[in-house]
Amino acid sequence: MVIIGSGFAGIGMAIKLKEAGYHDFVILEKADDLGGTWRDNTYPGCACDVPSHMYSYSFDLNPDWSRMFSPQEEIWEYMRTCVDKYRIAPHIRYGKRVVSLEWDDAARRWEVATDDGATLTTNAVISGIGALHVPSFPDIPGRESFAGPAFHSSEWDHSVELAGKRVAVIGTGASAIQFVPQIAPEAAHLTVFQRTPPWIHPKPDFALTSRMKQALRLPGAARAVRGAVYWALETRALGFTVDPRLMKVHERIALKHLRSQVPDPELRRALTPDYTIGCKRLLLSSDYYPTLTRDDVSLVTGGAAEIREHAVVDSTGREHEADVIVFGTGFRVTDMLKDQRIIGRNGLKIQDAWQDGIETYYGITTSGFPNLFFLLGPNTGLGHHSVVFMIEAQVRYVMSCLRLLSRTQARAVDVRPERQRAFNRRLQERLDPLVWNAGGCRSWYLDEHGANRTIWPGFTFEYWARTRKVKPDAYELIY
Ligand code: NAP
């Protein structure tokens, strides 16, 4: 078996395969280290905005998290510890970027090609490539003409000295609100280009004392904390998945937060979103707003219209001089999957299979591509909870498919197209009235046609229950 990617998804899959007695698998990793997004994102202040006791594997609770919301290095370290503990390292092949997957109808196997010219054949491929790793650079005219260093938040150039520099930040999403407070004290001046203001809640973060950590070692304690965090986060799904009007309470919390941290009414107005909270990812930060009130930080609304050799021009035509530009402009998500060279049964290209939009069955399998399993595939992202929980549900589903194969002696499973279509019809109907689609914003959750291809529209326990066991009648078995 081949797993692609050594992030939370790939490692989690590998651990469960080993546990079930499958040892004949490799993890192909494009980089020279493991960790996925937690390896790539090293920007100052990078941390998780989901509590660590929930943003970790349920089967490997860590009583030693230093904070409620742990920093990137610690999450990365946790992943390494898991790789050591479960002896996953011998399975990882570094520097192997998968460039093509091709199903061989006669042999009933996948051919997996990597960019070093090597080819592997395997009976199943599990893609754990994640959604947020292809940086999205904005189409701002003149971007190439900038004379100074310019880099994306996920490719932070630590060799660039920001001290004493005029820094322009483009974007005000989940990443930017974490690094802006960190770099502001260093830069001579920081100009933040905001196109759409995000909704922000206070971040209930705190350091966990050694006494708390000791308490977490007591039998059942770490599990109980995880349970409490799980249900606390799940209550937020009510507004997201049941009725957007329930988001009002979250809106009130966010507006109070803004009022308490930004005394200047004009700045406050510029920072007040005009769409329903939750339509874009709800952000957590207690130090972003105070940073914007500093004398050496300015907020420019309306986004960036042009980039010149030494400046960024705003939408009114005013030039803001800059020595360095940081793009906090997010990732290519819905179009990224479509770029891959994946060829399934009877030469079916994934681009043709998905010409009307990315469609899978529970985000895991897609018709015409037998034994190809996605982890964190389409419509399994969340706006309110930990995606590690979703990964674990998907890993269990893949294991269930593998058990089905060994029970029936079939070579492959291929989801029936009518089941996939019915699933997606219901999914899109459910998403239609919800906040991500109807909240009056444009986000990376939606594809170029405005269809939501990223979010799971229900409670996480619903997803968990529905993916607990594969339904054999949803699949064609290939012998
Ligand atoms: P993002 O949330 O997609 O934000 C991108 C920002 O760039 C937005 O403010 C966007 O403005 C702006 N932008 C994009 N194109 C632009 C253009 N042409 N001109 C001006 N502004 C432009 O990206 P991100 O902050 O990297 O976060 C992406 C996702 O990563 C998050 O939603 C989250 O799921 C994940 N993340 C998680 C954590 C965590 O703690 N767990 C931390 C960071 C990121 P508009 O809003 O107007 O489009």
Image (spheres, rainbow, N blue to C red):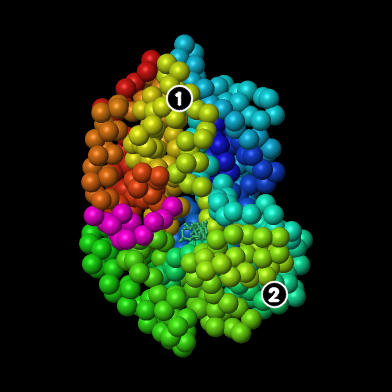
Image quadrant in which the C terminus is located: top left
Of residues 340 and 103, the one nearer the viewer is 340
Q: Please tell me whether mark 1 sits on a helix, a strand or a loop.
A: loop
Of residues 79 and 109, the one nearer the viewer is 109
Q: Amino acid at mark 1?
A: Lys
State the image quarter where residue 198 is shown.
bottom left
Measuring from the top left, give residue 64's x and y in whole percent.
Answer: 56, 66
Q: Which residue is mark 2?
A: 187
Is residue 131 rendered magenta in the image? Answer: no
- In the rendered view, would you say 271 is above or below 427? below
- Which residue is depicted at the point 60% across and 72% down? 191
- In the rendered view, would you say 439 is above or below 332? below
- In the rendered view, would you say 182 is above or below 436? below
Q: Amino acid at mark 2?
A: Ala
Measuring from the top left, give residue 126's x and y in whole percent.
Answer: 49, 34
Q: Which residue is mark 1?
A: 349
Image position of 163 (left or right of 114): right
Asked if the residues shown at circle 1 and circle 2 are in contact, with their CB atoms under 8 angstroms apart, the answer is: no
Mark 1 to mark 2 CA distance (whole Å): 48 Å
Which marked residue is nearer to the observer: mark 1 or mark 2?
A: 2
* Chain part drawn in magenta: 433-444
Q: Label 1: how many residues lie within 10 Å, few (<14), some (14-19) or many (20+)?
A: some
Q: Earlier in the sequence, mark 1 or mark 2?
A: 2
The answer to whether residue 273 shows anywhere in this view is yes
- Which residue is depicted at the point 48% across and 53% down? 57
